[in-house]
Image (spheres, rainbow, N blue to C red):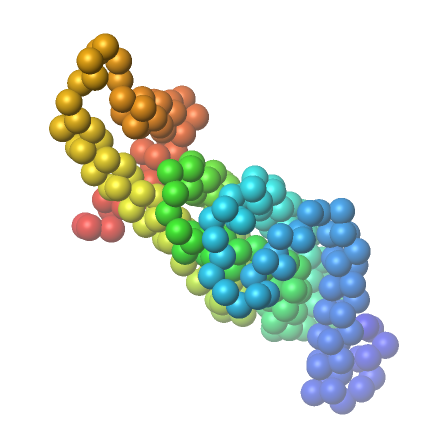
Amino acid sequence: LQKLTAEPSGIRRERCLNMYTMARSKVIRTALKPLPLGYLHLMKAGTKLEWMNIEMHIVSWTKDIEIIVTRVCEAEYHLCSQVFEKELGYGDLFEETFSKISSGSGLLELLQFGEASVKSRDEPSKLFKLLDMFEAMNNLWPSFTKLFCSHGCRHLQQKTRDLLKMIVQGAHNILLELKVQIEKQRKVPPTIDGSLPKVSSFVLAYVKHLVGEFYGPIMTQILIIYESWKD
């Protein structure tokens, strides 16, 4: 890149950006090959994804987005800063280059997959997966804020905010439906032998899992965020 400093300013800047972006993108693609990102191809069909096809991939999604943000984007952020701001003196190219590399790292596709997951049909098990997604995104929020705070990364800023809002809204919607089902079960007459009806047993076990040690604090945080929107 330093050899390009002898070229006219406009051409030099463009070539610096393109060469660096292509080189780093190739490195990232190679580094990401071990990750099981094949599920991202589900979105290429252009149709709405069904929850039954998505659910099995949520655990991988939470791990993959953490790896790409904290390892790939974090490393590229510091490298871009070192190259363009400190060595070449092109501080203004730092934001643009980092934005292009981050978008091509797989992060944009992961955020889009997250959106597709929230938009899929609501199922009882979906609430717990949404809570898993919220925890992953919430834990990454300091990194999102640090890495994508510049004007050049505004599209990634907006994507992360939109996804978090969708997750909170989606979890709240399912919780409201759960409340409706609980009210319905109260009207169900007791069985002859005094045992709980199957649906009531399912709802009871579901609620106990929801308010348990692991998911209880996450659900509480989501409700606090949702209620804050009303203020």
Q: Is residue 62 visible?
A: no
Q: Is 185 on the left-hand or right-hand side of 37?
A: left
Q: Is residue 3 visible?
A: yes
Q: Is 30 on the left-hand or right-hand side of 112?
A: right
Q: Quadrant of the N terminus?
A: bottom right
Which sits in the foreground, 85 or 13?
13
User: Residue at 42% across / 41% down in the picture?
Assistant: 126
Which sits in the foreground, 151 or 35?
35
Q: Position of residue 123 (x, y in %)?
A: 39, 43
- Work out whether 185 lies above or below 64: above
Q: Is 6 on the left-hand or right-hand side of 189?
A: right
Q: Give the total number of marks visible in the rendering.
A: 0
User: Residue at 79% across / 56% down in the picture?
Assistant: 30
Farthest residue to the front: give it.
Answer: 192
Q: Quadrant of residue 90?
A: bottom right
Q: Position of residue 109 (x, y in %)?
A: 58, 60
User: Residue at 50% across / 65% down in the picture?
Assistant: 47
Which sits in the foreground, 37 or 191?
191
Farthest residue to the top: give it.
Answer: 193
Q: Position of residue 137 (x, y in %)?
A: 48, 45
- Work out whether 180 lies above or below 80: above
User: Residue at 17% across / 32% down in the picture?
Assistant: 183
Which sits in the foreground, 186 or 103?
186
